[in-house]
Image (cartoon, rainbow, N blue to C red):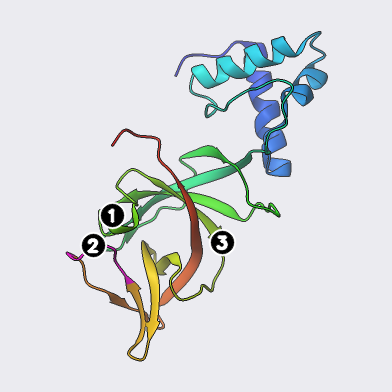
Amino acid sequence: MQELTGKQQQVLEFIQLHAHQTGFRPSLEEVRRHFGFNSLNSAVTYVKTLEHKGYLPQQDLIKGTPAAPSLMIPVLGTVAAGTPILAEEHIEKWIFITPPSPATTDYFGLKVKGDSMIGAHIIPGDIVVVHKQETADNGDIVVALFGEEATVKKLHEDDNGVFLMPANPAYHPIPVTNEVRIIGKVVSLVREHCS
């Protein structure tokens, strides 16, 4: 990534601190006020430069129109849509999503690796947006842990038991045992790549 000027670094740190404290990216007006810029255009210029240099995810900046607040969530690594693989819980980057209502900060992202959920339109490279929760309803798409390994599948319960179901006939259902722990429900996805 390109280097930042001193002022660009200050603006980035303000945006990151605000997002960490509130869960939301500050508005352009909040950036303008914090730095004492004479016009909103100065705030727009700094934010667009940070986006262009790759320090912030791009976001539509439409002045004068109300927009849903953007919730900043961490992408914590990779989750398998195939056989379970290690999901290293470290922050790879931050992305912005439009939060549901009421908004909470109990969300994280995981990058998908594998093709077992292609029938549910979840493809390799997608980022699934996950709401942290330990339970889910029959039919929900969930992220489940097997020890330290994680996978994304549809939760299915019937007379034969509880299973993690793939959305690809090349894969087999995974029986849910005591070693399996649901860590969240997939609520949306972000596709940043070209298919």
Q: Secondary structure at mark 3?
A: strand
Q: Is residue 45 left or right of residue 166?
A: right
Q: Residue at x 58, y 25 (%)?
A: 60
Q: Is residue 82 left or right of residue 186?
A: left
In primary-sequence order, the first of circles 3 and 1 is 1
Name the quarter where the C terminus is drawn: top left
Dividing the picture into quarters, in which one does residue 16 lie? top right
Q: Which residues are magenta?
A: 165-170
Foreground: disc 2 or disc 3: 2
Amino acid at dot 2: Asn
Disc 1 to disc 2: CB gap under 8 Å: yes
How far apart marks 2 and 3 lie (CA) works out to 25 Å
Q: Position of residue 82 (x, y in %)?
A: 26, 60
Q: Secondary structure at mark 1?
A: helix
Q: Position of residue 26 (x, y in %)?
A: 72, 31
In primary-sequence order, the first of circles 2 and 3 is 3
Residue picked out by circle 3: 132
Q: How many marks?
A: 3
Q: Is residue 170 left or right of residue 51?
A: left
Residue picked out by circle 1: 118
The front one of 135 and 6 is 135
How far apart marks 1 and 2 lie (CA) works out to 6 Å
Residue sticking out furthest to the front:
65
Amino acid at dot 3: Lys
Amino acid at dot 1: Ile
How far apart marks 3 and 1 lie (CA) works out to 23 Å
Q: Residue at x 60, y 10 (%)?
A: 5
Q: Is residue 133 magenta?
A: no
Dividing the picture into quarters, in which one does residue 117 lie? bottom left
Name the quarter where the N terminus is drawn: top left
Residue picked out by circle 2: 168
Q: Position of residue 94 (x, y in %)?
A: 53, 38
